[in-house]
Image: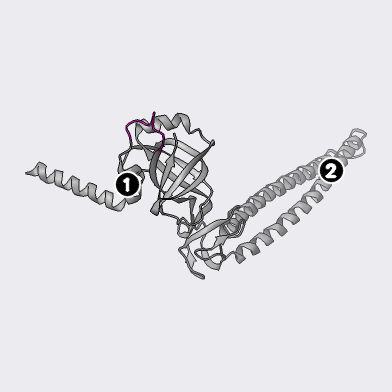
């Protein structure tokens, strides 16, 4: 009885996995006239697989600094132009600190030039006094006093350079914090979801926004091991291939794309499967997340 109960529990668990991971299941199904994927694709004239029409990549943006959001540059459903900050976290105080540190660095740089000039004059004076001492015109103590002045000038110059290095490091850290306060990307992205509202306060690690790269589309296709081995040799990485997208009502769209990844799929936690990513230009009329059929001629 106990083994039966365990078996029933495992069946229920598997059923729940299938219910909550329908997209992964849809990817595994082959929809060519309701037939299962053939054991071998060696002699197949075409193979039809189903997959989810997805953006090329998803970027989950998290806060890296603390502060209040004082600007949101794109709302959900809008395209964020390349280089535009996603949202801006208050950093006025950081800007003031940066301005102050730049002034300190400028003063230290000017002080270094003065110290270097003073050190050079003292070294000349020391050389002259040593010649005078050799001629018997000055005492040993006078030379020692000048040597002490040279040593002090060298120490002051070293200290100045250390302070400059520390100030430059502080400036770099401030610039990095300011950069993190205004995160941006160098390509246009679609704003899928903003997790925070204007004037809310955030701390490091909190989700700010989810962005989608919709410049290209991607469909992940899963195959049997036999078919994977065939396509692995025929669908070369970055080689343009022709394929068809089959929509409800038998509407067919002919297009081209490239195989970007050809590998064992590590993302499917519930099925150790084989597959690849098919990357192509977005198709008008298709909705992100829509399950479609892909027909290939292997």
- Across and down, in percent, residue 215 comes to 55, 51
Q: Residue furthest bottom?
A: 199
Residue sitting nearer the eye, 104 or 246: 246
Residue sitting nearer the eye, 203 or 136: 203
Specify which label sits upstream in the sequence, 1 or 2.
1
Figure quadrant of residue 185: bottom right
Report the number of numbered marks: 2
Q: Which mark is residue 120?
A: 2
Q: Residue furthest left?
A: 1
Q: Which residues are magenta?
A: 38-46
Mark 1 to mark 2: distance in Å? 79 Å
- Across and down, in percent, residue 179 comes to 60, 56
Name the mark nearer the viewer: 1 or 2.
1
Seen at 52% across and 66% down, the residue is 75
Quarter of the figure that contains the C terminus:
top left
Provide the major secondary structure of the magenta segment.
loop
Q: Can you see residue 30?
A: no
Q: Which mark is residue 25?
A: 1
Instruction: Tell me, yes or no, whether the highlighted magenta stretch contains residue 204.
Output: no
Seen at 10% across and 41% down, the residue is 3
Residue sitting nearer the eye, 209 or 118: 209
Q: Is residue 117 left or right of residue 41?
A: right
Seen at 46% across and 41% down, the residue is 277
- Across and down, in percent, residue 178 comes to 60, 58
- Across and down, in percent, residue 114 comes to 81, 51
Residue sitting nearer the eye, 3 or 214: 214
Q: Can you see residue 167?
A: yes
Q: Secondary structure at mark 1?
A: helix
Q: Is residue 178 left or right of residue 227?
A: right
């Amino acid at each position: 009885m106990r083994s039966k109960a365990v078996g029933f529990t495992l069946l229920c668990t598997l059923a729940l996995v299938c219910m909550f991971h329908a997209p992964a299941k849809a990817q595994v199904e082959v929809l060519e006239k309701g037939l299962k994927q053939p054991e071998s694709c060696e002699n197949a004239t075409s193979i039809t697989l189903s997959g989810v029409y997805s953006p090329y990549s998803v970027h989950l943006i998290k806060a890296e600094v603390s502060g209040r959001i004082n600007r949101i540059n794109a709302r959900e459903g809008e395209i964020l132009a390349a280089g535009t900050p996603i949202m801006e976290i208050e950093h006025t105080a950081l800007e003031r600190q940066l301005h102050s540190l730049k002034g300190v660095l400028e003063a230290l740089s000017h002080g270094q030039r003065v110290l270097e000039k003073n050190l050079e004059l003292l070294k000349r004076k020391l050389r002259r006094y040593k010649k005078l001492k050799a001629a018997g015109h000055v005492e040993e103590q006078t030379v020692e006093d000048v040597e002490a002045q040279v040593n002090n000038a060298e120490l002051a110059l070293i200290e100045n350079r250390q302070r400059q290095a520390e100030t430059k490091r502080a400036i770099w850290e401030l610039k990095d914090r300011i950069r993190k306060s205004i995160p941006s990307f160098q390509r246009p992205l679609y704003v899928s979801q903003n997790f925070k509202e204007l004037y809310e306060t955030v701390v490091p690690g909190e989700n700010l926004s989810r962005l989608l790269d919709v410049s290209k589309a991607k469909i992940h296709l899963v195959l049997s091991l036999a078919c994977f081995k065939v396509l692995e040799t025929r669908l070369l990485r970055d080689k343009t291939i022709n394929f068809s997208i089959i929509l409800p009502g038998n509407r067919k769209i002919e297009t081209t794309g490239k195989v970007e990844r050809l590998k064992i799929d590590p993302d499917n936690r519930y099925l150790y499967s084989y597959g690849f990513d098919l990357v192509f230009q977005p198709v008008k009329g298709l909705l992100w997340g829509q399950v479609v059929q892909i027909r290939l001629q292997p």
